[in-house]
Amino acid sequence: MLNRLRALLIISLFAFGSIGLAACGSDACEDAADKYAECTNQSGPSWDGECSGKVECLANCVNAASCDDITSLDPNSAYAKCRRNCAGQ
């Protein structure tokens, strides 16, 4: 069940249509992939494209969040609110 919930977090965090997430050209996205992998004990996403717009916004959410927030399913956490704000961009 926990792996399924983690998969949902990954999907909600990085699935915005066909936006790719590798080779951002910015440390924010690379740092976010590293932190996400560290917090979830899973490899981070494959980055493909520019680190800008929604992708950069989501990366900044990961970078600002605690590991507890990243792995939590609390919809009221600062991390969850940040992700929702990015989705509205």
Image (cartoon, grey):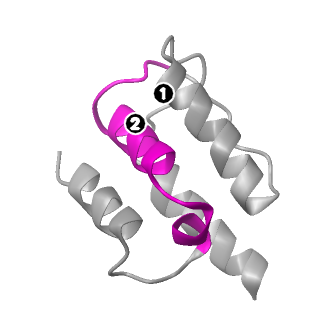
Relative to 9, is 52 on the left or the right?
Answer: left
Secondary structure of the residue carrying numbered label 2: helix
Percent position of residue 66, x then y: 54, 60
Q: What amino acid type is highlighted by mark number 1?
A: Ala
Q: What amino acid type is highlighted by mark number 2?
A: Val
- The answer to if 80 sits in the magenta stretch is no
Residue extending furthest toward the left: 89
User: Which of these two is toward me, 65 or 12?
Assistant: 65
Q: Is residue 34 visible?
A: yes
Q: Quadrant of residue 68?
A: bottom right
Percent position of residue 41, x then y: 82, 58
Q: Which residue is mark 1?
A: 28
Secondary structure of the residue carrying numbered label 1: helix
Mark 1 closeness class: few <14, some 14–19, many ≥20 residues within 10 Å: many
Earlier-in-chain disc, 1 versus 2: 1
Q: Residue at x 75, y 88 (%)?
A: 1
Q: Quadrant of residue 10?
A: bottom right
Q: Considering the whole magenta stretch, tell me its main secondary structure.
A: helix
Q: Which residue is mark 2?
A: 55
Q: Residue at x 40, y 40 (%)?
A: 60
Is residue 9 placed above or below 56 in the rendered structure? below
* Range of residues picked out in magenta: 49-71
Is residue 23 placed above or below 88 in the rendered structure? above
